[in-house]
Amino acid sequence: MWFFRFPSSPVTGYFFGLLVLAIISVLIGELSVAMAYRLNRDLISDTVHDMDHFQNLSIQALKVRDKAAFRACNSIANDAYGKSFFSMVTLSAASLWPVFLALGWLQFRFSEVTFPMPLMNFTAGYIATFIFCYILVRFVLNKIRHRFSFNTSFHQYTPGQKDLT
């Protein structure tokens, strides 16, 4: 990839290339999450609605001291919460697949490259340096996300939100 050879210094080129590769990985991952969310938006919205509805019913049943109704409604609300929680975990995990492709390519190209860690007795290879760049890019993107229009409603999701569209 040309961005690894853009700077004249090999070390600078390596880190510049890692940074560009991390940016590309983050952006492809974000697009994957947005697409997966768009495909599952109705299901997620229905699950969140069910969770809120049955939670409210269980609270009402608790107020009138109907223990059987409370347990039934609370059980359904807990199931809906579990579905909602794991849907969000799955969507979040959808952003990671480009990382594994990037690491596979980096292994092919840079498996022998290591950097001595200052004040420590070990070295960091392509995995540690890429993960560091990826986390840095992810952190910066989360800080500036509100300034861009690609901010999907998935990223604005909060538990108990009525409308996810």
Image: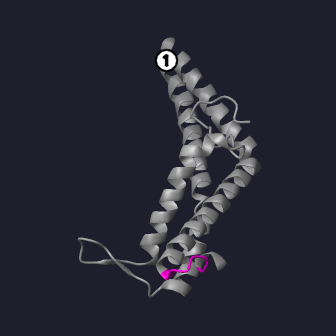
At 46% from the left and 77% from the top, the residue drawn is 126
Give coordinates of residue 35: x percent, y percent. Answer: 73, 54
The residue range painted magenta reads: 5-10
Residue 1 visible in the displayed image: no
Residue 82's place in the image compared with 67, above or below, is below
Number of marks present in the image shown: 1
Question: Which secondary structure type mostly characterizes the magenta part of the structure?
Answer: loop
The amino acid sitting under disc 1 is Leu
137 vs 120, left or right, is right
Is 42 in front, or is 4?
4
Residue 118's place in the image compared with 136, above or below, is below
At 61% from the left and 66% from the top, the residue drawn is 97
Quick one: SS at disc 1? helix
Q: Report which residue position mark 1 lands on.
A: 62
> Which of the image's four quarters has the N terminus?
bottom right
In the image, is residue 67 part of the stretch drawn in magenta? no
Q: Residue furthest top?
A: 64
Give coordinates of residue 99: x percent, y percent. Answer: 57, 68
In the image, is residue 8 part of the stretch drawn in magenta? yes
The image quarter in which residue 3 lies: bottom right
Residue 163's place in the image compared with 34, above or below, is above
Is 86 in front, or is 11?
11
129 vs 123, left or right, is right
Give coordinates of residue 53: x percent, y percent. Answer: 63, 26
Q: Residues within 10 Å of mark 1 (few under 14, many from 20)?
A: some
At 54% from the left and 23% from the top, the residue drawn is 58
> Which of the image's four quarters has the C terminus?
top right
